[in-house]
Image: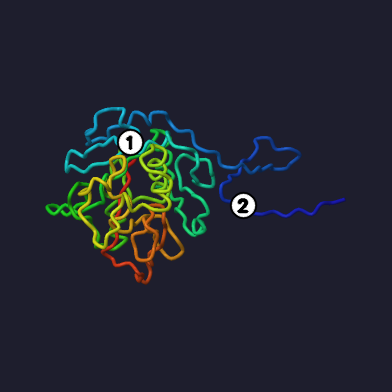
Amino acid sequence: MNEERQIYEKIEIEAEKGTNFEILNAITKGKLVIIVKKNKAGIYSENYMYPPILDGYKAVKNEWLAWKNGFIIERISDGSQFGWVPVGYLDSNGIFNGCDTEKFGRRKYGNCWYFEEYRDPMNDELLLMYESVKKYGGFYISRYDMSINEKNGKLQSVKNVMPWNTFKIEEAIKAAATFENNEKVKSHMMYGSEVDTVLEWFIDSGARTRYEVIKNSKNWGNYASDIQKTGSDEKYCTNGIYDFTGNGDKLTQEMSKYGPTLRGGYGFNHDRSAYNRCFKHIGEFKSRYCDDDLTFHIALWIA
């Protein structure tokens, strides 16, 4: 009996989210064998207890015991400060690239019905950053809401100045990406995976309760009608990081189908919760939020 055979120049097979294909080395009886493998959780360096001092920076808190709740470095050129997030120390309840047992990644706390409406773009930048986090055990985030240096017009993370809160979204993302863009250190506006990893750090370190992060963050975030100078009130500080919730809706690179995701529940008629998500219409640029109600933090990682 003759078998009818077809010849194809190219065949494309797409793996489901959270899986990859593996081609077996052995080809049996003229058949190519392809198996589907689920993505595994990353293995994180235990060096999270020894935060690296980045090129061009110096330690502000020079005690290694501070790795858990507030190791701070400062850029020598302009005084911008950043706090270490010890990812290797955290519970493995994160979701990243299809794996739901990661230390790094977005968190789905409780019955969060809107969680699936938001996504991090799995781009090269975020995937490379993830590899860096595994290798070094953590990453840095800006200690304060980002602001503009009045002398040179550049982005900075310093205390007791008004945050930069009147900008075009694309302009802010570009400024965050060029804050550090050399061979050794990279920067970007935070993704949802990073925001949720920081919130898990606040919980696991005992600095904040799960209720304070998920349900009601008013006791550690400025939810007044006016944005204030970042770092100006100690009660809005957690593990050395100021104004991570409140003091404006926090713009991130997490996305919904409508546009970028805002975190922190600062806007009208939203829960005052650091975990809360809503969206910003980037296309028509219309929403219930005034453009001067947006602030943001950035992340640093070792290339």
Identify the residue at horizontal 30%, vertical 52% (top origin). Answer: 221
Tell me the number on the disc at residue 19.
none
Name the element at disc 1: loop
Classed neighbour count for the residue bearing mark 2: other residues with Cα under 10 Å, few (<14), some (14–19), many (≥20): few
Identify the residue at horizontal 46%, vertical 39% (top origin). Answer: 103
Q: Which residue is mark 2?
A: 13
Residue 178 % position (x, y): 27, 50
Q: Quadrant of residue 24?
A: top right
Q: Is residue 177 visible from the viewing direction of this image?
A: no
Residue 215 % position (x, y): 42, 53
Placement of the C terminus among the 4 image quadrants = top left
Query: In the displayed structure, does residue 66 sit left or right of residue 276?
Result: left
Q: Quadrant of residue 285?
A: bottom left
| Image position of 115 with respect to 58: above or below | below
Identify the residue at horizontal 47%, vertical 55% (top origin). Answer: 119
Name the element at disc 2: loop
Q: Nearer the viewer, residue 284 or 111?
A: 111
Dot 2 and dot 1 residues touching (CB under 8 Å): no
| Image position of 96 with respect to 169: above or below | above
Give me the C-alpha separation between circle 2 and circle 1.
45 Å
Q: Amino acid at mark 1?
A: Asn
Residue 202 % position (x, y): 38, 42
Q: Nearer the viewer, residue 202 or 210?
A: 210
Identify the residue at horizontal 29%, vertical 51% (top origin). Answer: 176
Q: Is residue 30 visible from the viewing direction of this image?
A: yes
Query: In the displayed structure, does residue 160 sit left or right of residue 98?
Result: left
Classed neighbour count for the residue bearing mark 1: other residues with Cα under 10 Å, few (<14), some (14–19), many (≥20): many
Q: Earlier in the sequence, mark 2 or mark 1?
A: 2
Q: Which residue is mark 1?
A: 69
Mark 2 or mark 1, whichever is nearer to me: 1
Q: Amino acid at mark 2?
A: Ile
